[in-house]
Amino acid sequence: MKKYWEKIKTRLYSFIKDDFGGNLIEYALLIGFALFIFFIIVGIITSILDWTLGLSNDFSGLFG
């Protein structure tokens, strides 16, 4: 069992140190950052939509 974990550890270490593994990690970080920015933008847009909906409700309540 100990040899099994050592084998996994060495393969994982070589994968990270390899150019292809490094690129994979970079791409994963870029995708994560892009998703983070995407959710921030979606949150801003939904808050703007809620704000305009609130204004329209206030306007209709004022004259309705």
Image (cartoon, rainbow, N blue to C red):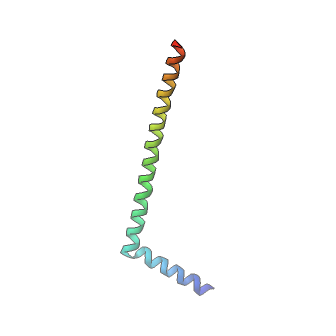
Q: Residue furthest right?
A: 1
**Which residue is most to the top?**
63
Quadrant position of residue 41: top left
Location of residue 18 with respect to 34 vertically, above or below: below
**Count the marks: how many?**
0
Instruction: Find residue 31 and report its horizontal and vertical position in percent.
Output: 42, 58
The quadrant of the picture occupied by the C terminus is top right
| Nearer the observer, 52 or 18 | 52
Which quarter shows the N terminus? Answer: bottom right
Residue 58 on image: x %, y %: 52, 19
User: Does 51 sit left or right of 2 as displayed?
Assistant: left
Where, by quadrant of the figure, is residue 48 drawn? top left
| Residue 40 screen position, x and y as percent | 45, 44
Relative to 62, residue 57 above or below: below
Name the residue: 58% across, 87% down: 3
> Who's the residue at 50% across and 27% down the image?
53
Rendered residue at 49%/77% (across/down): 12
